[in-house]
Image: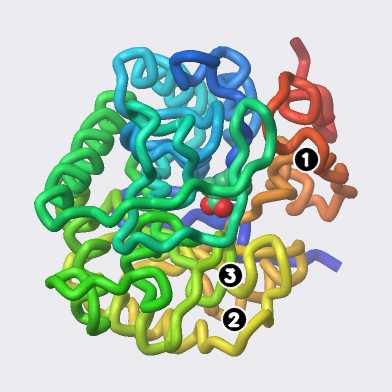
Amino acid sequence: MSQAKSKLFTPFRLGDIELKNRVVMAPLTRNRASRGTDAPNDLNVEYYRQRAGAGLIVTEGTQISQQGQGYVWTPGMYSDAQIAGWRKITDAVHADGGKIIAQLWHVGRVSHVSLQPGQGAPVAPSPLQAKTKTYIESGFTEVSAPRELALSEIPAIIGDFVKAAENAKAAGFDGVEIHGAHGYLIDQFLRDDSNKRTDAYGGSIENRVRFALEVVEAVAKVFGKGRVGIRISPVSPANDARDSDPQALFTHLVTRLNDTGIAFIHVVEGATRDARDYLPFDYKALRQAFKGAYIANNSFNRDLAIETIENGDADAVAFGRLFIANPDLVERLEAGAPLNEPDVATFYGGDAKGYTDYPFLTEKAA
Ligand code: 8OZ
């Protein structure tokens, strides 16, 4: 019996970006940038090139400034060496027919003094330390106590997002995703547990979404709204992110995002790397409230992805761990072929082992 190709493997226009299929490689922190410069290197080029079969690659979180860095050996988007390194990656992915967008990242309070300019305190909407860990050269450690951002400092951070977007454009990216998830700076502003400000950026939901919207609007001016999206994780407890009413908060956020006309929201459904039904949340309502495209993520397998796209509950599905272990994930999913198992021990830091040495289904001729 012949079977029609699942819609998951059909092209999709994400804003102004043409995707050859609806399988997205999720942003994945791997801590393998060059030591000292945090610039992408040739090993990173090979890793992304291997995964160019994805309809869209979202890069690992890429700090927009040194202040925006929270873990050791994550790549940046603020120096000439970093731009040059990224250029090699976008060229390689494009040469193999892929599309790639950069994830722009500021960690806010999820950082450690050893990673900060002048060994200063990390910055946050409010001076509240997150109950979470980061890792530095010596290993896992508690994040440092943050200091509260002065109102006068906020425009400079938005400026760093703009500069990073300009750099991403110069490096040949097809667009950018703003990291608004997982308890990092933008998420810290969004949530009432981490944002206790009494100025225009805190208090009401209207005020708490202000920083996110200003970043989105500024970045959209650089890339064009059709090449910009934002990642959010409404109920994920990652990095101590908590809010008293996520449904109201994120419904309001996406309604306001409609005014910006950006291309997509990328939604981590449930607890990151964990239960999809961690807390009740109406993702269908969120999808309906947003006029652009909806990329769904978190613990999807082949059947759930196919069903989700067929039902119209998402326009594309992002896979993280499966893309770590399967460079040719799209080919494997389409063929219903077996998948390699990811090796957790080599996720963060290290070399080619557990990075570029996962086997392809069909070994490519050299
Ligand atoms: C795992 C380890 C370090 C950072 C995220 C950027 O959760 C991350 C991250 C994930 O979004």
Where disc 1 sits, the SS reads helix
Residues tagged 1 and 3 counted as in contact (Cβ below 8 A): no
Vertical comparison of 177 with 72: above or below: below
Mark 1 closeness class: few <14, some 14–19, many ≥20 residues within 10 Å: many
Image position, residue 278 (x, y; %): 67, 80
Q: Which residue is mark 2?
A: 311
- Residue situated in front as seen by the camera: 39 or 59: 39
Mark with earlier residue (2, 3): 3
Q: In terms of sequence position, does the residue under pointer 1 or pointer 2 come before the other?
A: 2
Between residues 67 and 335, which one lies in front from this camera angle? 67
Residue at 24 percent of width and 80 percent of height: 203
As measured in the structure, the alpha-carbon distance from the residue carrying label 1 to the one carrying label 3 is 25 Å
Residue identifier under label 3: 237
Residue 95 versus residue 38: which sits nearer the camera? 38
The amino acid type of the residue labelled 1 equals Ala
Marks 2, 3: nearer the viewer: 3
Quadrant, the N terminus: bottom right
User: What residue lies at 44% left-to-right and 69% top-to-bottom?
Assistant: 294
